Image (spheres, rainbow, N blue to C red):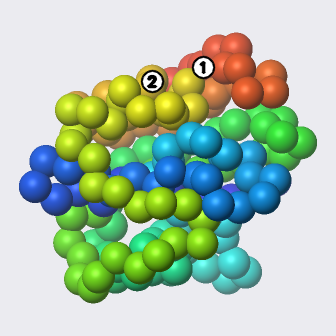
């Protein structure tokens, strides 16, 4: 079982996205993602997302808002539980990420990027202010189905 975070930073009707094109053997290669990553021992979801955003972007977020929980059973060999956050309070300057290219994307264009199939499902929930717990089933890189509960 793996625990991870995912964060979408917003400013001026734009979302900070990471084009995953730098790491070898990256399961996300070629896709655009929000920022985030795996928990370190003893971290809360908030501590993890703040650290991951800092490491990947150079930005220091404040008051990240938990907007949902994603579960991916047997994804690439592991059960993944991903705490999804948004943030619109941050300081600092963007750095060169070792995982890909960071870019502020107009909100209206985010869903037209090459994303994981599940992102096309849950990004509208975030936009609509719905708090969710969802399970997405993949076989390889193909989504086979999903279930969701809104709270």
Q: Position of residue 63 (x, y in %)?
A: 28, 73
User: What residue is rendered at 51% in x and 33% in y?
Assistant: 115
58 vs 99, left or right, is left
- Residue 106's place in the image compared with 122, above or below, is below
* Position of 85 relative to 141 (above/below): below
Q: Quadrant of residue 8?
A: bottom left
Frontmost residue, 138 versus 130: 138
For disc 2, the neighbor class at 10 Å (few under 14, some 14 to 19, many from 20) is: few
Query: Between residues 5 and 24, which one lies in front from this camera angle?
Result: 24
Read off the residue under disc 2. 121
Q: In the image as oriented, which residue stretches furthest toward the right?
A: 77
Please indicate, yes or no, whether residue 2 appears anywhere in the rendered image: no
Mark 2 element type: helix
Using the numbered discs, state the Cα–Cα distance from disc 1 to disc 2 in whole angstroms.
9 Å
* Residue under the point 16% across and 59% down: 11
Using the rendered image of the protein, determine whether residue 26 is visible from the camera's viewpoint. Answer: yes
Identify the image quadrant of residue 30.
top right
* Tag shown at residue 35: none
Tell whether 86 sits left or right of 26: left
Residue 134: image location, x then y, percent:
54, 32
How busy is the neighbourhood of tag 1: few (under 14 within 10 Å), some, or many (20 plus)? some
Looking at this view, is 98 or 147 the one in front? 98
The numbered mark, 1 or 2, whose residue comes first in the sequence reads: 2
Q: Which of the labelled discs sits on residue 146, or is there none?
A: 1
Q: Report helix, strand or loop for mark 1.
A: strand
The residue mark sitting in front, 1 or 2, is: 2
**Residue name at image x 56 percent, y 25 percent:** 117
Query: Are discs 1 and 2 less than 8 Å apart at CB?
Result: yes
Residue 39 percent location from the top left of the image: 66, 70
The extreme left residue here reads: 12
Image quadrant where residue 12 sits: bottom left
């Amino acid at each position: 079982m793996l625990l991870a975070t995912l964060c979408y930073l917003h400013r001026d009707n734009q979302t900070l996205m990471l084009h995953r094109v730098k790491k070898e053997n990256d399961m996300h290669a070629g896709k655009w993602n929000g920022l985030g990553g795996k928990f370190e021992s003893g971290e809360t979801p908030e501590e993890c997302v703040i650290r991951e955003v800092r490491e990947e972007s150079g930005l220091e977020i404040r008051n990240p808002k938990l907007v949902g929980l994603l579960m991916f059973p047997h994804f690439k060999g592991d059960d993944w539980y991903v705490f999804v956050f948004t943030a619109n309070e941050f300081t600092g300057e963007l750095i060169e990420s070792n995982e890909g290219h960071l870019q502020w994307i107009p909100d209206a264009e985010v869903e037209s990027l090459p994303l994981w199939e599940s992102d096309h499902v849950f990004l509208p929930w975030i936009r609509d202010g719905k708090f969710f717990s969802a399970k997405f089933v993949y076989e390889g890189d193909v989504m086979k189905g999903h279930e969701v509960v809104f709270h």
